[in-house]
Image (cartoon, helix red, strand yellow):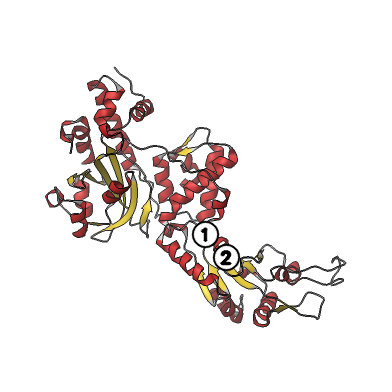
Amino acid sequence: MKEIESTITINDLLPIFDCVTDAIFIDDGSGICHWCNDACEDMYNINIEEIQGKTVDELEKQGIFSPSVTKRVLDEKREITIMHRNRDGKMLLTTGTPIFDAESAGRQISLIITTSRDITQFSQTSGDSRPTKSILGASPFKSTEQYDPANAKKIIARSEAMQNVMMLAKRLASVNTTVLITGESGVGKGLIAKTLHDEGNRWKGPFVTVNCGAIPETLIESELFGYVAGAFTGSRSGGKKGLFEAAQGGTIFLDEISELPLNLQVKLLQVIQERQITPVGSTEAIPVDVRIISATNKDLEVLVKEGKFREDLYYRLNVVPISVPPLRQRHDDILPLIRLNLAKFNKNLGENKTISSDALSILIKYPWPGNIRELQNIVERLIITTSHDVISSDDIFEFIKKDADQNTSFSLDLSLAAAMEQAEKEILRQALDNYKSTRAIAKVLQVSQPTIVRKLNKYGLTKA
């Protein structure tokens, strides 16, 4: 462990780690476990003698945890956060933070500090995220890639739940059957519909979107099917082509299909069955070659029972259903979505804002009742309303505190963040008493000298 027990880091850090409620491991650069705190013994149902001196491979085979974040840190040489289960079935959010050998210029890992938190109450999926809080190495979160407008229309599918959705969508893309996409408001049903079109054999044809809830009932028939000259007062002299006809050879996406009036539901059923439309005011049918995809955030089966939606149309639309999970069940997608939208709105608004690690921790744990649309809105508002370059937890509370108070599954417990900041401050204070320069402190604590300077400024610490 590179004489860690003789340094200020271990002398001050280990007693503090034993006081926090989150599990903490310390592994060396070979993946051998050397120490864990009291909370770790409780969370993983182990004792230190059981793991001390063993490799993470051995511990993984014993089922103490799976998978190992330490192995990924060693492979990728960066801070990694994953969600996984312990052998008791609890869902844990675990972050592995590498500490590099000061003499290797950031190439050789000497230690890996791993922290775990029980998140069973608000998380249902597992996978890779990014850090919620690291030790001494924490830095504001920002998007590292340049924003590409084309990425805004790409579907984020890091989570297993969304990967399954995308696999199904790609299988259905080349099949011309009708598809019903269901899911809460803001989950991205329109993007799934566009994927079905773009990945299929109709990609060269038009993709026409119709929001059935946004068109007045008196106009929706003429909008969908068109009309002939003189069909009604105020109609165009030459008539008008409807949206079904405009989608010839391509796809028509009927969003909010539950809002379609009952009299139009009959006509839509006829279009599906006969593959032809009749414009308003005409007796002549027009053949249409259109794939129909519909979407709703309501339970159509319930509406059928209530007499608000035709049962025969429901079965015609629901030949193959795609259910898009809410964001709270797609935990691994949250961070990539934050990264994408942070880059997007920074570029659009001419800003270069970042997000602090404690603020990011809150965003990751937030249940996002408004799903992706809410995430986009909050990121944009944060960039617009914050006057400073780093978005903090205080900035975020203003937008989500009300929802958090009403949602019992969302915890704003930041005890680990507070404990780590207190630990950092105390270690830095003692380091200032024992070492003459920030360069010397950086070497002892095995971080960069600019990191030490930034941390000292953060806590208002100076040489006595």
Task: Report whether 141 appears left or right of 265.
Answer: left
Q: Quadrant of residue 288?
A: bottom right
x%, y% of residue 37?
Answer: 20, 44
Quarter placement of the N terminus: top left
Which element carries disc 2, helix, strand or loop?
Answer: helix
Whole-number angstrom distance, CA of label 2 to CA of label 1: 12 Å
Q: Is residue 402 at all visible to an observer of this figure? A: no
Number of numbered discs = 2
For marks 2 and 1, give the one nearer the viewer: 2
Check the image and report above or below for 421 versus 170.
above
- Mark 1 is surrounded, within 10 Å at the Cα level, by few (under 14), some (14 to 19) or many (20 or more) other residues, namely many
Q: Which residue is mark 2?
A: 193
- Mark 2 is surrounded, within 10 Å at the Cα level, by few (under 14), some (14 to 19) or many (20 or more) other residues, namely many
Check the image and report above or below for 262 versus 333.
below
Closer-to-camera residue (408/459):
459
Q: Amino acid at mark 2?
A: Ala
Closer-to-camera residue (171/358):
171
Quick one: label 2 or label 1, which is nearer the N terminus? 1
Quarter placement of the C terminus: top left
Q: Pick out the residue farthest to the top.
A: 464
Residue at 21% from the left image edge and 52% from the top image edge: 56
Q: Is residue 4 at all visible to an observer of this figure? A: yes
Q: Amino acid at mark 1?
A: Val
Closer-to-camera residue (270/107):
107
x%, y% of residue 205?
Answer: 66, 67
Q: Which labelled disc corresponds to residue 187? A: 1
x%, y% of residue 72?
Answer: 30, 50
Q: Pick out the residue farthest to the left.
A: 49
Which element carries disc 1, helix, strand or loop?
Answer: loop
